[in-house]
Amino acid sequence: MPKTRLIALMSLALVAGCEPSPLTPQELETAKSLALMSLEPIPPSPSNAQADNPQAAALGAKIFFDAGFSGNGAVACATCHLPDRQLQDDLPLAKGVGTTDRRSMPLLGAAWSPFLFWDGHKDSLWSQALGPLESPVEHGATRTFHARHIAGQYKAEYEAIFGTFPDAKDWPAHAGPGGTKEEQTAWQVLPENTRKEIDQVFANIGKSLEAFQRTLPLLQTRFDIFIEALAKGQNPEPDQSLNTQEIAGFQLFTGKGECINCHNGPRLTDDHFHNTGVGEVAGLPKDRGRAAAIALLDSDPFNCLGAYSDAAPGQCGELQFMSRDEHEFERAFKPPSLRGAAARPPYMHSGQISSIEAVVEHYSLAPEAPSGHTELKPLNLTTEEKAALIAFLHTLDPL
């Protein structure tokens, strides 16, 4: 082909918007695996028969924002999971009626997670919701308190979903398996059938909350728009493109930085548990992470195999076949999604690291773990590499 003809064709291609991709074919395939375009539908929740019932979701939304589900009347689920802050609270330690030992995890994308909390001590989104309701430092109330609140405020809506509400006239105002000694005693003297009725109402509160949280969408980012355009053979709009530094950061994320080892898939988390050498917080109890959570999960009456689960035993594979090697999981925690992470400091399970720059420095240096064994190895990132990695993480900020 004559040289002038080749130049002319190249010029036409550029005018038509066929600029070459800034990513290699292999890099583009990896990028597509991290983008929302690869997100699978929310998996079913076999232990919750109402998980996708719009009526349950509507009730769950009301419960989520109702501070009446707290001992002091001032704490709702939304207190620690702010809708305008990616459903987290920007605090190193969550604050309800008191202060917790860990940071609030963002709820966006939680419906895809097989295990919940930083240590995975719950195996469904509905059972996860029950823990804070009874925690003395979160909602600060008891099982009967919450069940009676449903009876007083939401009985008709509850019955439209779950059937007839049990007779609650003789239920004590404050009783439960946790709480004060008096509250525990009040619970223990209740007839077993009454306790089971209350437990079922309590479980259904969680199932309503799960139904609501399953309606919360993951938020699109500039990275998603950029990669989807490239995947379609299109050129992204200039304000939606990744610049040279951000692309270099992506290459570090998936290459030398090894971030993708734990932060993979379109939610940018592998949902597993990892020891990454994060330090302890002075004044807080020793936190063994997943190692201490295994026994809690197995003994939980609200787990997938429990009496209040709607699942058949064969549908509880995650619980039945999970690893129970405590030594393997010493001080291991679940990596949160990196979607929006650059905009929500502080970081780690108890807010130990104050900035995204310090997080990158931590992974570059790979300090020894306080207990167990860190999975990290020193990366020795240069100043330019750190800046590029941070620039890429900001492309994951929600639009």
Image (cartoon, helix red, strand yellow):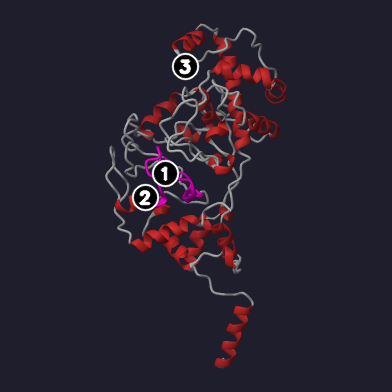
Q: Choose the circle earlier in sequence order: 3 or 1.
A: 3
Type of residue at label 3?
A: Gly
**In this picture, residue 370 sits left or right of residue 33:** left
* Residue 21 x, y percent position in the rendering: 53, 70
Mark 1 residue element? loop
Name the kind of residue labelled 2 in the image: Ala
Dot 2: element? helix
Say whether marks 2 and 3 touch (CB < 8 Å). no
Q: Nearer the viewer, residue 118 or 33?
A: 118
State the CA–CA distance, disc 2 to disc 1. 9 Å
Marked residue nearer the N-terminal end (2 or 3):
3
SS at mark 3 in the image: loop
Q: Which one is closest to the eye, mark 2 or mark 3?
A: 2
**Decide: marks 2, 1 in contact (CB < 8 A)?**
yes
Mark identifier at residue 192: none
Give the magenta-colored segment's residue range.
334-359
Q: Residues within 10 Å of mark 3 (few under 14, many from 20)?
A: some
Q: Residue 268: x and y, percent? A: 48, 50
Of pointers 2 and 1, the one earlier in the residue sequence = 1
- How many other residues sit within 10 Å of disc 2, few (<14), some (14-19) or many (≥20)? few
Q: Which residue is tagged 2?
A: 358
Where does label 1 land, which residue? 347
Name the amino acid, label 1. Answer: Tyr
Label 3–label 1 contact, CB within 8 A: no
Give the vertical position of 318 relative to 173 (above or below): below
Identify the residue shown where x is 58% and y is 47%: 218
Q: Which mark is residue 179?
A: 3
**Whole-percent x and y of residue 383?**
34, 61
Within the magenta stretch, is there residue 303? no
